[in-house]
Amino acid sequence: MKRIARITLLLLLAAGLWLALKPTLGNRRLTFLPLHLSEYIDYMDFWLNLTSFAILGATVWLAFGALENVLRRLCLMLGFITLLNLLLEVMQTSIPGRAMDQADVWAGLLGCALGLASGLALQLFSVRKKSRGTVPQVLFLDQTGRLGGAELMLLDIAAARAADSEVALFQDGEFRTALEDAGVKTRVFKLGEEAATVDKQAGLGSILGSIPAILDLILQIAQAARAFDVVYANTAKALIIGGPAARLAGRQLIFHLHDIIADGHFSKLNQQALVLCANCCARSVIANSESTKAAFIASGGRAELCVVIPNGFQIPAERTSKAEMQALRASLGIQPDAWTVLMAGRLSHWKGQHVLIEALKHVPGAHAVLLGDALFTDEDRLYAQQLHALAEEPGLAGRIHFAGFQTETLAYFDLADSVVHASVFPEPFGRVIVEGMLAGKPVIAARAGGAAEIVQHGETGLLVAPGDAPELAAALLRLQSDAAFAASIARQAQQSARDIYALPAVQEKIEAVIRQIAGRKPTPAPEAAASTPVQLAA
Ligand code: UDP
Ligand code: GLC
């Protein structure tokens, strides 16, 4: 049936093209020689039709399979073409010796109105046709196959509604395995090599070079999105692809914003592209903190789109046993009683591992475990090498322990006496801070962004100035020397984290946004599905 519709459409388009060409075949209007202005307008009229039909044909053929979508776009585009024709007719009146052709004008007006009205009617018809009353079907998009914080959050969200979701990744990797292990259907749509290397700081050159691959991916995602009610873009690149794709497919888009859109995190061009795309394409923007929301609005984002929902976390039923902890310490080369700091997170300059290493020079005898690896860029890999060199400096040798990336992180938090976060740029949210609090450890975090929202200084942790190694050292010495204070802030932090960041409540808030955007009643998703925790394979 679909095939017959496609062939019929192709024949119709071919006939249209032939009709547009027919009066001019063998005619001198086919030449590119300079012409008198009035003839030039005729000439443009013809080429305009030709180009419009070509674009129309290509768009219809490449992007859409279902007749309903084909017809809807066809009507809108015919209306648009007719409007352009009408403008050309009006322009002709300004040329001496030429008059407006009344019949053409009426045909233009009528065609335009008809095209728009039919497009609108089909749009309404297709909205009514969607499966109302059931759980909205969601296509999640994420740019990476690695396991960063944004991906760990998505893993929990998608796993809780696995039966009604699918995840499309632009890169393969351990994230796909984790999703599949959690029962989430996952597909990898590979972004071309050129586009895959465009990062948050990319300039115009590399962005332009990646356009063909990006267009190709947009069309593929548009086609996939037609089977869902909502497209949910989980990261910045996912928005750039998912925004236009959702529009083409006529589906609603939610953008989960995990980044602070500001200098230091994104180039100016990328900031503008992101905000424009979110403003034009998203029906809702879920910001992971108030700071993330404020930065989005400050860069021109529409405030009315935003809702703040923090990350959610499973509260582990049991923590690591003393024996396991000691075994882990021994495997890292740390004495059982050595005062130890954990810093978890990918190795990247803005995450500030160098600040902790510098601070440790002023905290004699203290050890640091750096959990994580360089995940995303060559710059990060170079930074990781520099950290290894730093760790060998006099006074530090044997005190900095690189644990690499681990999927099971609980025991690393448990073995620590304190957990440090030291990002030099504002942290959008900072999962590792909450994980430290949930582990019942005294946390020190950099006073900026989401970190400063999570930690109340002196009550649920300590805040220090970002990038300030001496202040971090002073905070570490305070925790080391005042065990009662350290235990008291750790206790309060654990309670506060359990109250605010428990996964089921956060999942419910996200599900409410999905339901609202999909036009469903705001009844919560089934209890069992909403609270199913995700276990990562070791
Ligand atoms: N993480 C992990 N294994 C590691 C290091 C980190 O699973 O070896 C996790 C960490 O527990 C946290 C996430 O990666 O949940 C990092 O998230 P965060 O929000 O702190 O920073 P991001 O890297 O997303 O900017
Ligand atoms: C991003 C942010 C991080 C946040 C995570 C989850 O990776 O860099 O701060 O915690 O997303 O929202």
Image (cartoon, grey):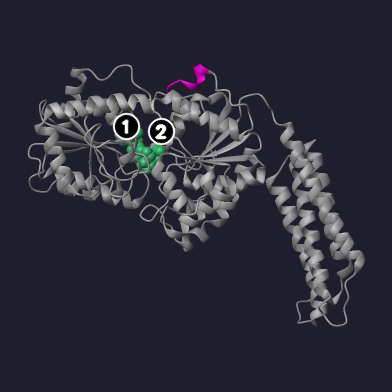
Residue 530 within the segment the image draws in magenta: yes
Coordinates of residue 467 in the picture (x, y in percent)? 23, 50
Residue 32: image quadrant is bottom right
What numbered label is drawn on residue 434? Answer: 1
CA gap, disc 1 and disc 2: 9 Å
Sequence-wise, the earlier of marks 1 and 2 is: 2
| Mark 1 CB near ligand 1 (8 Å cut) | no
The reply to whether discs 1 and 2 touch (Cβ–Cβ < 8 Å) is yes
Identity of the amino acid at label 2? Asn
Residue 366: image quadrant is top left
Identify residue for label 2. Answer: 311
Identify the element where label 1 is drawn. helix
Identity of the amino acid at label 1? Val
Coordinates of residue 346 in the picture (x, y in percent)? 31, 41
Question: Residue visible at 62% across and 26% down?
Answer: 521
Mark 1 Cα-neighbour bin, 10 Å: few <14, some 14–19, many ≥20: many
Residue 401: image quadrant is top left
- Seen in the picture, residue 517 relative to 526 is either above or below; the reply is below
Q: Can residue 147 be seen in this view?
A: no
Q: Which of 219 and 261 is in front in this view?
A: 261
Mark 2 Cα-neighbour bin, 10 Å: few <14, some 14–19, many ≥20: many
The residue segment tinted magenta is 527-533
Question: Residue visible at 21% across and 20% down?
Answer: 324
Viewport quadrant of the C terminus: top left
